[in-house]
Amino acid sequence: MNTKLIGRWGEAAAADYLKKKGYKILGLGYRTRMGEIDLIAEDRGTLVFVEVKTRKDESFAQAREAVTGTKQRRLLAAAELYMAAHGADRPARFDVVEVYAPEGVETKKPQINHIENAFSGR
């Protein structure tokens, strides 16, 4: 299974899921020198930086466990760069979306778990 392909597929599935929950998607795959933010969205005036983790299943570990302290610090730094570049002076939070796709990109209905405010910015 091509991990880049399944990762992008999972990000698209997460974006669709969030749109159905009323979120406005502002960006996908935002790259900075500090790292990449998978999704940037808005939820009732709050800027939401979303890390998407796609897995076949949770037999090894839950997908959210891959969002380590190091990854969190990189996401925070990338989010700060985004906010500075876009003049975003409003509340922000960090969410994690787990996408479980047993058949990879052929999965018709992936299981999606959305963890709001998964970790704090400071």
Image (cartoon, helix red, strand yellow):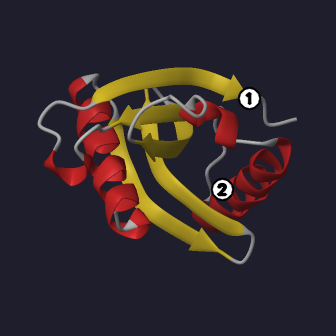
- Disc 1 target residue: 119
Marking on residue 41: none
Drawn side of residue 101 relative to residue 98, left or right:
left
Drawn side of residue 100 relative to residue 79, left or right:
left
Q: Amino acid at mark 2?
A: Met
Q: Dot 1: few (<14), some (14–19), or many (≥20) neighbours within 10 Å? A: some
Drawn side of residue 89 relative to residue 53, left or right:
right
Marking on residue 83: 2
**Do callouts 2 and 1 mark residues in contact (Cβ within 8 Å)?**
no
Q: Quadrant of residue 67?
A: top right
Above or below residue 3? Residue 107 is above
Residue 100 seen in the figure: yes
Q: Amino acid at mark 1?
A: Phe
**Whole-percent x, y for residue 74 in the image:** 77, 57
Residue at the image position 46 percent from the left and 33 percent from the top: 98
Q: Dot 2: few (<14), some (14–19), or many (≥20) neighbours within 10 Å? A: some
Whichever of callouts 2 and 1 sits on the residue coming sooner in the sequence is 2
